[in-house]
Image (cartoon, rainbow, N blue to C red):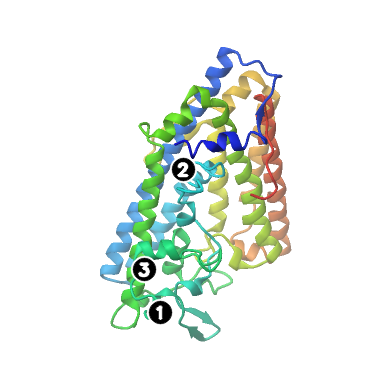
Amino acid sequence: MKKIFLLSCSILFLAKCSSEEKATPQIVANKSEIVKTYSKIVLASYSDALEQAQKLNQEIATFTANPSAAGLEKCKQAWLNARPSYLQTEAYRFYSGPIDNDSTGVEGLLNAWPLDEAYIDYTKNNSYIIETGVINDSLNYPSITSDFLVKDNELNGETDVKVGYHAIEFLLWGQDESKTGPGNRPYTDYLIASNKNAFRRATYLKVVSNLLVESLQQVKQQWETSSNFRKEFEKESNTDASIINILIGLGKLSKGELAGERLGATLANKSQEDEHSCFSDNTHNDFIYNQKGINNVFVGSYTMTNGTKIEGYSFSEYLKNTKISAFNETVLKLNKSTDAIKNIPVPFDLAIESATGQQKITEAIASLKEQSNQIVQIAKEMGYTLIVPEKN
């Protein structure tokens, strides 16, 4: 527990309490309520992410037991269904919390990208099939287990991604060779009768799917009401540190991750290999639900996949009651970013190649940076000084 909360001290050079705001009992209580609402939303959204991952895992188990075209499509749909809830949780990153703590975090096992397909399975170069990766190399990789894949993940660099959502995505869709649609892996890749490495491919898919569930369970447990992390996070003496962590997470997702890595770097390289969900052509939804996650935290509200609404006192209410101009400006910036993201043409891999698409992406990048700057302003209005770097 002490290890995780070292962050509270380590970022104080970036964020500190200002003497301009008097910490009245009511202000302290309101800030504490923001933290508690945040914790409730985090737990609910990780619960959803876990539930959807379990459904995906079941579809994969059914499909690999009896491969069929219909079964593969069900797996793809389950993967697409699993993404929105997880993507919203990315608003809880970037402050060394349970998801990305240096020593115990599992973010790298969940959503690492970009992914070089050749480390996992065969790839195509025009009409030639190049049999590489763990699946096609039984000599160097005789057994495919979760322990091995975790140990070997990113061993050869950051694109050597062997586990997580995007590894599963590749195993379901295959390479995206089309300019107008997603990848088109045949279900026969999993038929033992017609493909020599079908059994190893199915084993790999099941192992990474199980690992996805296990990793999400680990993060969710840290946000349960009885967990040591949540108790420390909500402790009144840690309220300022927790508020700072929440805001730095939102600011970094907005600027360094979305505006920088996921939009900016891909636009600069104009390469679909840098696209976040390139195999399924689902990247536009990645941006939309990341942005929704930021908005959830600001308004203190999250609607679960079963329709249950989790809500409470929020940054929105705090500013509305104390700094109405900051409230109005934040709503404006959030809405502007949401609209800018939705205006990016679909599919994203075509958008990065067209003048219109590039312009829309550029506008979204600018809006997200403005949004991050407004998050810094929220911190200022609450009595903190916050610095969000250009790169995470």
Instruction: Say if residue 326 shows up in the picture.
Output: yes
Mark 1 lies on a secondary structure that is helix
The front one of 262 and 227 is 227
Of the two numbered discs 3 and 2 on the same chain, state the one appearing first in sequence: 2
- Left or right side of 369 for 54: left
Q: Amino acid at mark 2?
A: Pro
- Left or right side of 64 for 253: right
Label 3 crowding class (10 Å Cα cut-off): few <14, some 14-19, many 20+?
many
Q: Are marks 3 and 1 in contact (CB under 8 Å)?
A: no
Residue 201 lies, in percent from the top left, at 36, 73
* Mark whose residue sits in front, 3 or 2: 2
- Give the residue pinned by disc 1: 136
Q: Residue at the location (45% across, 51% down)?
A: 106
The front one of 224 and 254 is 224
Label 1 crowding class (10 Å Cα cut-off): few <14, some 14-19, many 20+?
many
Instruction: Say if residue 328 shows up in the picture.
Output: no
Between the residue at mark 1 and the residue at mark 2, the CA separation in whole angstroms equals: 35 Å
Residue 209 lies, in percent from the top left, at 36, 60
Indicate whether 300 appears above or below 178: above
Indicate whether 285 appears above or below 132: above
* Mark whose residue sits in front, 1 or 2: 2
- Left or right side of 37 for 251: right
Residue 204's disc is 3
The quadrant in which residue 384 appears is top right
Between the residue at mark 3 and the residue at mark 2, the CA separation in whole angstroms equals: 26 Å
Q: Amino acid at mark 3?
A: Tyr
Indicate whether 158 appears above or below 370: below
Q: Amino acid at mark 1?
A: Asn
- Give the residue pinned by disc 2: 98
Q: Residue at the location (29% across, 63% down)?
A: 61
Between the residue at mark 3 and the residue at mark 1, the CA separation in whole angstroms equals: 11 Å
Residue 267 lies, in percent from the top left, at 68, 61
